[in-house]
Amino acid sequence: MARKLSSISPDWWDYTTLDSEIIDAVARLTPRDLERLSRPGFKVVMYD
């Protein structure tokens, strides 16, 4: 399956080439979901 062409630059891979299901899932993330993405070596810090 070929990847979607980028809306920004057809010769590059970027966020516009991601599958629509992934984009939709990310759009549903809450701030609490984002905080839970922290793991060793990757800390999510939120500022108000």
Image: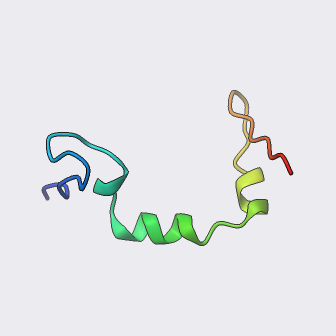
In the rendered view of the protein, which quadrant contains the N terminus? bottom left
Q: Nearer the viewer, residue 43 or 15?
A: 15
Residue at image point 55% right, 68% down: 27
| Residue 15 on image: x %, y % | 37, 51
Asked whether, in this view, residue 38 is left or right of residue 27, the answer is right
| Residue 7 on image: x %, y % | 24, 56
Residue at image point 36% right, 69% down: 20
Residue 39 vs 21, above or below: the answer is above
Residue 4 vs 37, above or below: the answer is below
Q: Farthest residue toward the right?
A: 48
Asked whether, in this view, residue 26 is left or right of residue 22, the answer is right
For the rendered model, the colour scheme is rainbow
Q: Quadrant of residue 23?
A: bottom left
| Residue 38 on image: x %, y % | 73, 42
| Residue 4 on image: x %, y % | 19, 58
Residue at image point 26% right, 49% down: 8
